[in-house]
Amino acid sequence: MDDIPTHLAIIMDGNGRWASQRGLPRTRGHAKGVEVVRDIARVAADRGVQCLTLFSFSSENRARPKAEVDFLFTLLERFIEADLADLHTRNVCLRVLGRRDDLPFKLKSLITHAETLTSENTGQRLQIAFNYGGREEIADAASRLAKRVVAGTLDANAITPEVMNTELLTGGLPDPDLLIRTGGEHRISNFLLWQCAYTELYFTDIYFPDFSEQDLDTALDAYKKRERRFGKLEGEA
């Protein structure tokens, strides 16, 4: 097994609880989390992680209070506006995964601009899962395949896992090698359900705003000790 994951995914959990423990509004925790994203993305690139996918805002999070949801929309807008030039200079390819139909117009425009600007960059692939749900992603991919079958451009019997994979939002990328979840919960919460079939899972009680370079290295060290067998017996090639 390679020592460093090619594709690292992180569920950035615990922002609200971090703020509440300090007597701060939940929004302060989300803002602090963005600061940590900047640091972790740089460190991951330095360690050799080629693709970093961050779970920022789930489709289920839309049920939270409107003020918090609106703040999260604004926070992503601010991140793109403040960091896009630097990301582009560092040759980062930025993508946002998730449904966009019900996002504010300004945010949709910023996402499109950021993805277009950085689309040819060949450095780290930074993906932000925003307004994203794994079941929705799979359903949307299946719907697109069904439309091709109805149109006569695809034989239903030709739909394989490989074909399905090309229709996913991560199509063309390797599946995550390692998934880190901060915040103490031990579940993947509808994140990259298809892609994480054989992903190594790492859980930590640390809230994401406190997640440091050293904590990332601890997770990467734990990953190095795993033996990934993909259904084979121990020691099989």
Image: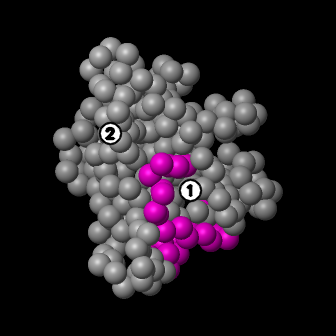
Residue 203, numbered label: none
Res 204 visible: yes
Quadrant holding the N terminus: bottom left
Percent across and percent down for residue 8 are 41, 61
From the viewer's side, name the closer residue of 128 and 172. Answer: 172
Q: Residue furthest top?
A: 151
Q: Quadrant of residue 45?
A: bottom left
In the rendered view, does 108 fall on the left or right side of 162?
right
Q: Are marks 2 and 1 in contact (CB under 8 Å)?
A: no
Percent across and percent down for residue 183 are 67, 63
Three-letter code for the amino acid on which mark 1 is drawn: Ile
Measured Cα–Cα span from mark 2 to mark 1: 27 Å
Q: From what the image shows, is residue 89 above or below residue 44?
A: above
From the viewer's side, name the closer residue of 189 and 193. Answer: 193
Q: Quadrant of residue 2?
A: bottom left
Q: Which residue is mark 2?
A: 163
Which residue is found at the position 48% from the left and 68% from the top? 200
Does the stretch in magenta take in 92? no
Three-letter code for the amino acid on which mark 2 is drawn: Val
Which residue is found at the position 37% from the left and 16% from the top? 150
Magenta segment: 191-220
Res 107 visible: no
Q: Which residue is mark 1?
A: 11
Helix, strand or loop for disc 1: strand
Helix, strand or loop for disc 2: helix
Label 1 crowding class (10 Å Cα cut-off): few <14, some 14-19, many 20+?
many
Q: From what the image shows, is residue 39 above or below residue 57?
A: below
